Each structure stands twice: as structure tokens, then as C-alpha cells.
Amino acid sequence: MKNDKIIGPRAYINLDRCRSNLIAIKKTVGDKKLLCVVKANGYGHGSVKIAKSIANIKNVQFAVFSFDEALELRKAKIKNEILVFSKLQKNNIELAYKENIILNLSSFDDIEHIESFYLKNEVSPKYHLKFDTGMTRLGFDLNDAEAIYESLSKPLHPYVEGVYTHFATADEGDLSYAKKQLSDFKMVVRKVERFGLKFKFIHCSNSGAVLNLEKSYFNMVRVGMLLYGALPSNKVIDNIGIKPVMSFCGSIVNVRKVKKNTPVSYGGVYKTASDTNIAVIQTGFADGFPRPWFEQGYVIYNGQKFKIAGRVCMDQLMVDFGNVVPGLGDDVLFFGENQIGKLPVENIADQINSTPYVLFTAVGGRTKLIYIN
């Protein structure tokens, strides 16, 4: 093993695949605005690098959760529109105006704050109005349409340029609840517009709805999980040809020959079925490797599956290689697709009752992100 080789956990981020995924999505949704979601450090992929790789594609805007995430993109010289999903904080309004960051209006308190700022300054950032149609999270109630119009002074109307909601079940097999949400959203948008507000952007379609619910596209779609090349759940089918952007890997740092019935790792719950080669990989659950995966899990080495041996440790995990003697410093693939092989993140998520969202965003800390084009 070469001493200069990176032996810790690495996530290889293929920016070409990210771009090709977005282009495939564009072919599906047509000439809509693409609100690309890069919150939570780009779902663990690196928000700035991801955003820069697609910023020049036509119709691309960005969405983040926190105001600090939006500022990070601005500091990186990203000029595209940025929407912040989180609850509006009045101390961010002035900086949002200066940095051209779009804020989320989801309550009457929010309206009071933006009215106060406008009265003092006679300027305002832009806003998107959010309705809760069934997520039971942030958002105005469906019966708030008239009160919203009455609460917003006329000079502020042009600054409220978007309206949206969020589906709870668009990535499920049964779309009846999502269709009810869509119907309610259409109704409340019509109602608000009849009162006098006009919206430049209307959006409710997330990754699940892009695949499952074409009628939800309006003139903007939100692209999250599909951008990163994974499906939001096992209830949807990839009909656009996405490719995984992240390949999560680690290196073999030790190999030892052990006898049959040798216990491996904490608790000794795993015992070798025969004489075998046990390899130590310098990656653990603190680096994002899913600990519950050890019971039925495996890694990929030279295109073959090898079983995880025993409980995953904080910093390391062990793999049973049987009669194969792997090379020190060689890489194994935890999930993704590269020259080592292929292991879809969705497969692991299904096995451990999790989601790709959880697995992607857990990759971090000591894991080095390596970008390839």
C-alpha cells in the first residue's frame, strides 16, 4: 500500500452525471424553470460545487433550506436566483434584499415583518408564498387566501412573485392524496389570483411528482433527489435515465487469515463460517456508512459482492472475503457506480428501512469529497 494514497472514506462526485441528469429532467418537463435543491450541502454532494456545475444551464434557479446556505452560494459568486425554504426571520430581510435572496412567506407574522421593513425602507426582497395543502408543516392554511390579500399592502404585491406547496406522497404508489393536494393547491392559487395577486412562478412538483404526476408541473419544478441520480422511493420508476452522482468508497488497510468460528467486531455476533480472509476498511458509521446495513449488507470489490463481517464500528468496518485475498490499499464500493462496480443506494435504503436522503446526507465529516468531470 502506497503511503501517499488516501485510505480514509471518499465520496467521488461525478459532476458530468449531475449535468446529464438535469438535462434528462429538462427533456421530461419541457421549458419549465428548474428549481434545483442544493440544501444540506447539496444532499451531501457539496452545494457550491454542484451549483456551479449546473448554474449555466438554461432556466436553472436554486433552493436551499437555511439563509446561511443561500449566503454560502452568494459568496461563491453564484448569481442565479436562490429561494430559502425555512421560516422567515426578520433580521434576514435586509440582507436578503442586498443579496437578491428570495424568502419564504408562510405565516401572517411573516407578512407583518415584511410590511414593517417596506414601510421603513421602501424596498423589499422577493418572496414565494407557501400554502400547506397536506404536509402539516410550514405554510398558510387553504382558507387564508382572502386574509393574505388583505394583509399585503398593494406596493408589496409585485415582490410576492411565487407561490408553492409541498407534496407528502408524490413518490408513493397510491397518488390519491397527492392528487387531492394538487387540486387544493390549484383552487387556492386561483382564489388568491382572483383577489388580485399575480404570480410569476407556481410550483409544487418535487422529484416524485416529476416522475409520477405530470399535471403538477405548472411553470416551475423542484429538482432534488433526481439531480443526484437516485429515486426518492422504491414506489417510483426511473423513466428518464438518471445516473448516480456519488460513489462512496473506502480502502482496505489490513487483511488477516482467520479460522472458522472466529468472532468479528463488537458483541461477537458474527462468527466466520469457515477459514477466511477478513479485511479491515477504514470507514465507519461516523463517516456515513449505514450501521444497520451490517446484518444483510455487503460491499463491492472488483465487481463482486463481499459480506460485511460483524457490527460496523465508528471508524472501521470488517469484510469477509472468503478465499479471496484482497490487496492492501485497494478500494471497495459502499454505494454508487464506478470502475469498481455498482451498488444502488436505493437497494441499501430499502433493506434498512431508510431513504437515499438519509444515506446521502450522512456522508460527511471525515469523508473527503473528490470531484470528477
Image: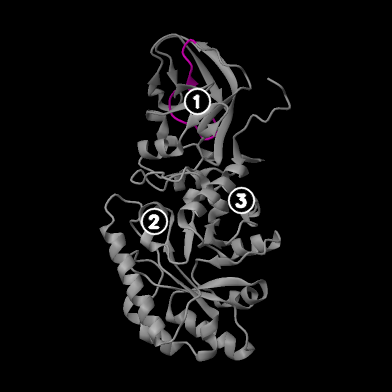
Q: Which mark is residue 209?
A: 2
Looking at the rendering, in which quadrant would you find the C terminus?
Answer: top right
Q: Position of residue 336 (x, y in %)?
A: 51, 35
Main SS of the magenta segment?
loop
Q: Position of residue 222 (x, y in %)?
A: 48, 59
* Mark pair 1, 3: CA separation: 26 Å
Is the residue under label 3 in contact with that under label 2 (CB below 8 Å)? Answer: no
Picture residue at 48% right of the left edge, 77% below the top = 199
As measured in the structure, the alpha-carbon distance from the residue carrying label 2 to the one carrying label 3 is 22 Å
Write the start and end of the magenta stretch as one range.
Answer: 309-323
Q: Earlier in the sequence, mark 2 or mark 1?
A: 2
Residue found at x 59% / y 48%? 19
Residue 321 drawn above or below residue 160? above
Q: Are marks 2 and 1 in contact (CB under 8 Å)?
A: no
Mark sitting on residue 89 = none
Q: Alpha-carbon distance for marks 2 and 1?
A: 32 Å
- Give, as a three-letter code, the residue at label 2: Ala
Q: Indicate the secondary structure of the residue bearing disc 2.
A: helix
Residue tagged 1: 300
Residue holding disc 3: 50
Q: Quick one: SS at disc 1?
A: strand
Q: Residues within 10 Å of mark 3 (few under 14, many from 20)?
A: many
In the displayed structure, 125 sits above or below 365; it is: below
Residue 363 location (% of width, % of height) = 54, 42
Tag in front: 2 or 3: 2
Q: Can residue 6 be spotted in the picture?
A: yes
* 167 relative to 62 in the view: left or right: left
Q: Nearer the viewer, residue 190 or 257?
A: 190
Residue at 47% across / 67% down in the picture?
A: 219
Q: Secondary structure at mark 3?
A: helix
Q: Nearer the viewer, mark 1 or mark 3?
A: 3
The residue under label 3 is which amino acid type?
Ile
